[in-house]
Amino acid sequence: MAKVKKAFFCRNCGHESPKWMGRCPACGEWNTFAEEVIQRDSGASSNGSLIRNESAKPLRVHEIEEQSQRRIDLGIAEVNRVLGGGLVPGSLILLGGEPGIGKSTLSLQIALAENGLRTLYVSGEESQQQIKMRAARLGVHNSECLIYSETLLENILTQLDEQKPNLVIIDSIQTIYTEIIDSSPGSVSQIRECAATLLKYAKTSGTSVIIIGHITKDGTIAGPKILEHIVDVVLQFEGDGNNIYRILRGNKNRFGATFEIGVFEMGNEGLLCVDNPSEILLSHYDEPLSGIAVGAAVDGIRPYLIETQALVSNAAYGTPQRSATGFDLKRLNMILAVLEKRVGMKMYAKDVFLNFAGGFKVSDTGLDMAVVAAIISSYFDRPIAEGVCCAGEIGLSGEVRPAPRSEQRISEAARLGFRKVIVSGYMRKGASLPPKGIEVVYIHRIDELPKAIFG
Ligand code: TYD
Ligand code: MG
């Protein structure tokens, strides 16, 4: 008779425990343990037991055959960029994101793109008819793309054997299950076992596999977090549901740089690559308006220019209102305190509202100076001269610190035709000459900023 085993798993990190615990000792989260019944066939063992590997032998480093890493062009430029120049054969990729953000759309676009790959798109969420409707919207450029609606892993493996695709997409890992485990799809043990089997398949067949995983804000579904350490690449798809821009972020990449980002725009015919994010994040006005400043930002390793808008008005009530969209409110409060103390602006009697173009969320401290510039401009109701942008971090004593990758920011500003960029005077100078056609203004303290932006 098969052995019945029960265990408790943390839904956040997958930590296994024989008894229930209030707090996970591995990740520190509270109330995340759930009991799961694991029933294994007597012969089968865990970790991808569905695929047997012919025995490999340990080798000395010099005995291992060197293989130049071939990259497969997926036919979508921004995805290639995040992967570090294309897909590595035999890699296992996790594409995570909140429901409705566009993971299925992006992966179906990869499957339908003109890349010459024989792609098997396995959906456990949608029927073939539903996918056909979506494909009609996106436009089919790859006649080799196969669509398969299935949730049982054993059936999927049979099809993989039969069809021998070059790329497999699993939408999503929470919907597929294997018969050798008795818990429901989406549980920690199912997700682990299915992923381990797919990993083994990818490594033995040399076929790349993209696994889609939903992440919810409260983490109630066994999250893709437990998969992060077994996959080669973790991609995160993010964005504000109310906005059309989406960012694909490489959080982990065994074959390339992390910190790379890809920018997309969600349209009626799917996701479009945005090669030049600065162009969509800068507006052009007929006359200069007060409260608008341009910041030279860097996300990961990609520089872009973004418009910051501030509104400073007299507070009608005792406690002034402070609101920031896309920016950390605590950081805004800190910046306002610095302005009060170091520049002598009476912020205690002002409401302050802050916004970034395109609904972008920024966490780059190099945008501090642009935020200050927008606030100063609105406070004095004086527009900032055209063609001026800022890059610098503000310290508590009102000092302007250099933003990371300042040179890249300056180059991006020059490339977009800006005539003046204001940076920290503490920046290491002489490493490379500033590009031609742009004036670089160095300031040391925040009280020098008004002169620099209005002058
Ligand atoms: P989807 O890709 O199903 O998200 P996920 O798989 O991450 O849950 O859907 C994303 C949203 O995008 C959905 O609300 C509909 C919208 N959408 C468009 O705006 N344009 C399109 O061309 C398509 C296909 C979807
Ligand atoms: Mg989906």
Image: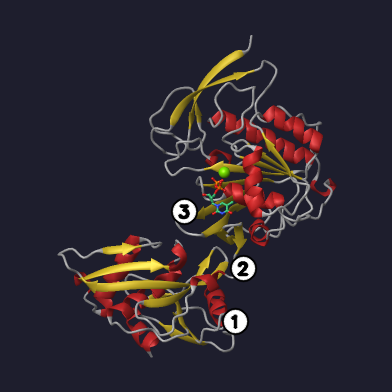
Is 20 left or right of 432, judged from the image as shown? left
Tell me the residue at 74%/57% (across/down): 73
Q: Which of marks 3 and 1 is nearer the N terminus?
A: 3
Q: Local crowd at mark 1 within 10 Å, few (<14), some, or many (≥20)?
A: few
x and y, in percent, of residue 45 in the image: 67, 23
Is 58 left or right of 421, judged from the image as shown? right
x and y, in percent, of residue 318 in the image: 15, 64
Q: Local crowd at mark 3 within 10 Å, few (<14), some, or many (≥20)?
A: some
x and y, in percent, of residue 278 in the image: 53, 72
Tell me the residue at 55%/38% (across/down): 226
- The residue to which callout 2 is attached is 275
- Seen from the viewer's position, the closer of residues 93 and 59 is 93
Query: Does the CB distance between marks 3 and 1 fall below 8 Å?
Result: no
x and y, in percent, of residue 104 in the image: 60, 46
- Asked where in the image residue 218 lies, by quadrant, the reply is top left
Is 250 left or right of 311, judged from the image as shown? right
Distance, label 3 to label 2, CA atoms, is 21 Å
Distance, label 3 to label 1, CA atoms, is 41 Å
In the picture, the disc for residue 241 is: 3
User: Is label 2 in a helix, a strand or a loop?
Assistant: loop
The amino acid marked with disc number 3 is Gly
The amino acid marked with disc number 2 is Asp
Tell me the residue at 66%/49% (across/down): 135
Q: Is mark 3 within 8 Å of ligand 1?
A: yes
The amino acid marked with disc number 1 is Ser
Considering every residue shown, the one lying at the far top of the view is 1
Q: Local crowd at mark 2 within 10 Å, few (<14), some, or many (≥20)?
A: few
Q: Does the residue labelled 1 lie within 8 Å of ligand 1?
A: no
Tell me the residue at 47%/85% (across/down): 387
Q: Nearer the viewer, mark 2 or mark 1?
A: 2
Q: Nearer the viewer, mark 3 or mark 2?
A: 3
